[in-house]
C-alpha cells in the first residue's frame, strides 16, 4: 500500500492538500502514474513551467492556449491539470462533464490575484463605452466580466479583431497590455496587474550577460517589463519562445521567462546553450512559486484519490465560458 493514514486525511485534502499523506519512497512514481492514467482514462496536461519530472510524465505540455484547446477537446474521464488554479478552472469551464483535478489546490497566480472581481466590476462600470479583453491568467469571476479572453499566443490577434475605434479595457496584465498597445498602435486602458515572476528580471544583469555572451539571442515573454522587452531579440508566449529556439540558427539564448521552459528547450535542441535571465535578487534563475507547488508525489496522490477536484457554480461556469469560446473561435479561424 503506497499511502498511509488515508481515510482520516482524505477528508481534508480538498481544503488542505496532501500534507498528511506520505508516499512510499520505494514506489516508481512514473510507473504508478502511467498505470493510473490507463486505469482511470486520465489525461495529464502540464504547463511548461512545471518541474521536469512532471513534464516528462505528461500527455501534453503546452502554453495556456494549447492547454485550453486540449482541455476542451479531450474525451478522457479525468483531466489532471499540472499547472495553476486558473488553468484547471478554465479546463472545467470548457469541459464541465469531465472530472478536473489539480495536484495542489493552493497553486495560485500573483497576476490573477492582482485583479479581484468586485474591484474590477467597478472599474468596468466606470467605463461603460469600453469592451473588456482579459488575459486568461485571471479568475472565473473576471472572465465572467469580460467580452473576450486572450493568451500571450493570441493577444495581438484578439485585439486586432476589433476596430481601431473600439475602446478597450485590457486586464489584468499591464505589461502584456502595454506591449500589445505598442505593437497594435492602440491605447487600451490597462488594469494595473503584473506577474511576480516576470516583473523581477534585472535589466542590469541581463545586459551584463549579453556583454559576456555577445552571440546569444535574448528572448522574452511579454509579461516582462518594457525595459526588458526593449533588449529582446524575440518576444513570445512559452510555446512561441520554444519554437523560436528550435528554428533560429543561434547556438546560445538568454531566456527571460520562468525556468521550467528550459527543460523542453534543452530536450529539443541539445546542441544549444540556454541561459536563464537572472532576477533582481541573489538567485541565478527565476521560478514561479505557485507552479512549483506541484510535485510528482502530489501528482500521483491526486490521481490515486481524484482530489483535490475543481468545483464551480454552473452559472459562473457558463458565464465565464462565453468569452473563452469567443477567443477559441477567433484563434481557430486564424489557424492558431
Ligand atoms: P503562456 O502559457 O501563455 O506562455 O503564459 C505564461 C504564464 O505565465 C502562464 O502562467
Ligand atoms: Fe501567474 Fe506569473 Fe506564475 Fe504564470 S508565472 S502562474 S503569471 S505568477
Image (cartoon, helix red, strand yellow):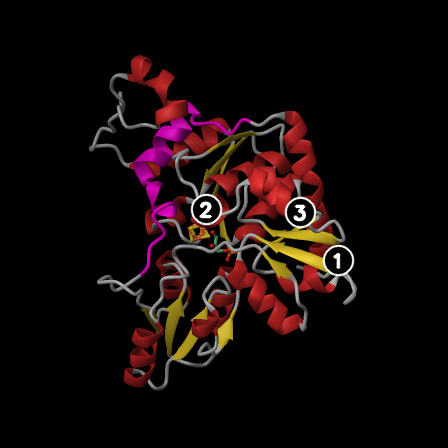
Tell me if residue 159 comes above or below residue 228 in the rendering: above
The answer to whether residue 328 is visible is no
Left or right of residue 49: residue 330: right
Residue 214 is situated, as x and y percent measured from the top left of the image, at: 34, 86
**Disc 2 within 8 angstroms of ligand 1 (CB):** no
Structural crowding at the residue carrying mark 1, measured as other residues with C-alpha within 10 Å and reported as few (<14), some (14–19) or many (≥20) = few
What's the distance in space between the residues labelled 2 and 3, CA to CA? 33 Å
Read off the residue under disc 3. Answer: 124
Residue 46 got which mark? 2
Q: Does the magenta stretch include residue 107?
A: no
Tell me the magenta residue range.
286-311
- Sequence-first disc among 1 and 2: 2
Q: Quadrant of residue 72?
A: top right
Q: In this view, does 143 lie to the left or right of 285?
A: right
Circle 1 SS class: helix
In the rendered image, which residue does mark 1 sit on? 333
Amino acid at each position: 500500500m503506497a499511502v498511509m493514514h488515508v481515510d482520516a486525511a482524505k477528508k481534508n485534502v480538498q481544503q488542505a492538500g496532501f500534507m498528511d499523506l506520505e508516499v512510499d519512497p520505494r514506489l516508481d512514481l512514473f510507473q504508478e502514474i502511467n498505470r493510473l492514467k490507463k486505469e482511470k482514462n486520465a489525461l495529464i496536461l502540464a504547463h511548461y513551467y512545471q518541474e521536469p519530472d512532471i513534464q516528462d510524465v505528461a500527455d501534453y505540455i503546452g502554453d495556456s492556449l494549447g492547454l485550453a484547446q486540449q482541455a476542451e477537446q479531450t474525451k478522457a474521464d479525468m483531466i489532471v491539470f499540472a499547472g495553476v488554479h486558473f488553468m484547471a478552472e478554465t479546463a472545467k469551464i470548457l469541459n464541465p462533464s469531465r472530472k478536473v483535478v489539480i495536484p495542489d489546490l493552493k497553486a495560485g497566480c500573483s497576476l490573477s490575484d492582482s485583479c479581484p472581481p468586485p474591484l474590477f466590476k467597478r472599474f468596468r462600470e466606470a467605463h461603460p463605452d469600453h469592451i473588456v479583453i482579459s488575459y486568461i491568467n485571471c479568475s472565473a469571476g473576471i472572465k465572467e466580466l469580460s467580452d473576450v479572453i486572450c493568451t500571450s499566443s493570441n493577444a495581438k490577434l484578439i485585439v486586432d479583431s476589433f476596430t481601431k475605434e473600439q475602446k478597450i479595457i485590457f486586464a489584468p496584465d499591464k505589461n502584456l497590455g502595454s506591449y500589445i498597445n505598442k505593437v497594435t498602435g492602440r491605447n487600451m486602458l490597462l488594469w494595473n496587474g503584473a506577474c511576480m515572476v516576470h516583473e523581477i528580471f534585472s535589466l542590469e544583469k541581463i545586459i551584463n550577460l549579453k556583454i559576456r555572451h555577445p552571440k546569444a539571442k535574448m528572448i522574452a515573454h511579454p509579461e516582462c517589463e518594457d525595459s526588458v522587452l526593449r533588449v529582446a531579440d524575440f518576444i513570445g508566449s512559452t510555446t512561441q519562445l520554444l519554437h523560436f529556439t528550435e528554428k533560429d540558427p543561434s547556438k546560445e539564448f538568454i531566456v527571460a521567462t520562468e525556468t521550467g521552459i528550459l527543460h523542453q528547450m534543452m530536450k529539443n535542441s541539445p546542441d544549444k546553450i540556454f541561459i536563464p535571465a537572472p532576477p533582481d535578487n541573489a538567485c541565478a534563475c527565476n521560478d514561479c512559486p505557485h507552479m512549483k507547488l506541484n510535485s510528482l508525489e502530489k501528482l500521483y496522490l491526486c490521481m490515486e484519490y481524484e482530489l483535490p477536484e475543481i468545483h464551480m457554480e454552473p452559472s459562473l461556469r457558463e458565464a465565464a465560458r462565453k468569452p473563452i469560446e469567443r477567443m477559441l473561435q477567433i484563434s481557430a479561424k486564424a489557424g492558431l
